[in-house]
Amino acid sequence: MKTSIPVGVIFSQTGATSVIEKTQLHATLLAIEEANNLLATNGLEIKPFYMDPQSDPFLFSSMAEKLIAEQNVTVIFGCYTSISRKSVLPVIEKHNKLLFYPTLYEGFEFSPNVIYTGACPNQNIIILAEFMFSKFGKNCYLVGSDYVYPYESNRIMKDMVNGFGGKIMGEHYLSLEASHTEFRPIMDDIAASQPDFIFSTVVGSSTAAFYESYAQAGLQPQTLPIASLTTSEAELASMLPFARADHFTAAPFFASILKHSPIPTWQQLVTQIGDVPINQCWESAYFQVMLFTKALIEAQDIDTDSLLKVLRGMEVEAPQGRVRVDPDNNHCWVYSRIGKSRADGDFEIVKESKRTVRPDPYLMSYAISAL
Amino acid sequence: MEQRDVVAGLHQMQVGLCHPIGAECRLISQQLERLGMTYKQVWPPVMADLLSVDLVVLAMVPEAIIKIDKALFQTLKNKIIVSVLQFESPTVLDLACKLNSSSLLFSPVKPFGVLSAIVLAVNQHKVREDLLKRINKLEGRVESVRIIEQAKRFLMDTSSITDTEAFRIIRNRSMDKRCSIEDIAHSILTAKDALESALGENSPINTFAKREPKSKVTGSVVRIK
């Protein structure tokens, strides 16, 4: 007789950010399946209750409320945009439940009820800016989606560009659903102003339109590439092949790590995954279930406080390498890597940190001179 | 002003509740009603709806606040602002500061804390207004001291009198004419300018200044005016 552990899973299958959330859902369910093999010996079984919020931030919170009330879940895996996280946060805190958030975000948050498994700015923007400055130059053009994450990311990029004596050649924000028509005039302006690189915080389904418009405008990635924190394998898969190659993304994980891994577990995982475009958010979603499973075994309990006690400082062997939950800020120590995109939809890793980088969500130790 | 007065004065205030419609907006509006305050809900912020309000409870939704035009931004800056924060990130905090927010509420807002935030904001705003008034007054005073100083210097240079004597002349004149010392100083300087432009090189400043210091020629100097 197994004890069933109900958990909530909230990722969108439709809407503007479903491209990436579908892969997070895939990773979560796959990892739960594998965890259950492991937990069987402990007489435990994780039972996922999945809900589809359709990329609507308000549905996220009502669904979290519902999962807690009706399915009695202690833990929720979910959320992509910051707005969706912010809408779930009060629900989680009110009921003292736990949210595992598998997405890079802008930082400046700490909730004792959240484990943050994506990168925060000090783990991706800094290495990306340094790389782009040294390879292409310091004059930067900013294009992003119209919400808080792009604003904050651009703020840091602007700081760095100015600190290094570069120039911001333009700054535009478009809706998450922006189409080719809206990107076209921006491409003309980029062609005219000739920056050294474009920093894109375009998120969701508009990413494909952005990269395709870039290629259609005849801009050359060899001299004026796009640098991004969010364009992953999932976004590359969603765009036409001619638009994919030779751009840069900073992330803790790229699918190529898993695909070329000598470790049998990962080789086996790759065959199981099939053609799902695995990416940094997929990986965070995957290893956060590993964290939860390990916590469950160690704590021998399902209440939030017992789980949190063992989660803080916990380490697991994730696909990206060994990661650790920071005991002070609940964010993870992850790798900083830069990938160069290829036409086949993968990234070639061109730079990486030797060790995992400490998460610094409030950018307290961030200083340009530290680079 | 004592805190009791701030609370008592709240009923007379018009509140603009700039918040997207939803559960939190409802919660704040209900609490405003309990506090006996009249409000109108408006989202996104529109000039026409906000001109007549005294206090604005403003949701710091960055993508909406960033799009506020200059005129409305200026209008808002002069209101008493209570910002409602959902994000504690630099862009949002920067916007809250640029709008001169006098206090903050944090999302999810609870009924407890709304009154405190409003009272604090009203008080902070009043303190700032009082300080601004005082600064304006002091700036005026500094300017008047500067004018009197210049007029005195002119009298001293042209008539070889002492600082005290020059001041006495200006003061006596102001008492005779029943106007302020500053006004007299001002007319002396106007006269000085007129003389200088009329006489050019032969200006009395130039000629008088070259003379040996003489004593007590006060009468003639005052006649300049």
Image (cartoon, rainbow, N blue to C red):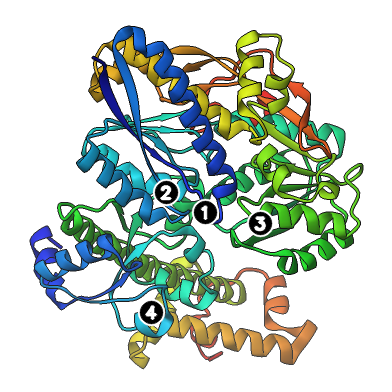
The residue shown at (59%, 58%) is: A176
Tag 3 or tag 1, which sits nearer the N-term?
A: 1
Q: Position of residue A90 (x, y in %)?
A: 29, 44
Q: Are marks 4 and 1 on the same chain?
A: no
The disc placed on residue A14 is 1
The crowding category of the residue bearing disc 1, from other C-alpha atoms within 10 Å (few below 14, some 14 to 19, many at least 20), is some
Query: What residue would you read off at disc 4?
Result: B171
Percent x, y of residue A116: 45, 30
Disc 2 with disc 3 on a shared chain: yes
Looking at the rendered structure, the kind of residue marked 3 is Ser
Q: Chain of mark 2?
A: A
Residue located 68% across and 60% down the image: A172
Q: Any mark on residue A206, and which?
A: 3
Between tags 1 and 3, which lies in front?
1
Tag 1: residue type?
Thr
Residue drawn at x 30%, y 19% as measured from the top left: A307
- Which chain does tag 4 point to? B
Identify residue for label 2: A52
Please identify, in this view, whether the residue under mark 4 or under mark 2 is nearer the observer.
2
| Label 4, label 1: how far apart the Cα atoms are | 83 Å
Q: Nearer the viewer, residue B5 or A273?
A: A273
N-terminal-most mark, 1 or 2: 1
The answer to whether the residues at label 1 and label 2 have Cβ atoms under 8 Å apart is yes
Name the kind of residue labelled 2 in the image.
Asp
Q: In this orientation, which residue lies closer to the viewer: A108 or B225?
A: A108
What is the three-letter code of the residue carrying label 4?
Arg
Question: Disc 3 or disc 4, which is closer to the eye?
Answer: 3
Query: Is mark 3 in CB contact (under 8 Å) with mark 4?
Result: no
Label 3 neighbour load within 10 Å: few <14, some 14-19, many 20+: many
Across and down, in percent, residue B33 comes to 13, 71
Helix, strand or loop at disc 2?
A: loop
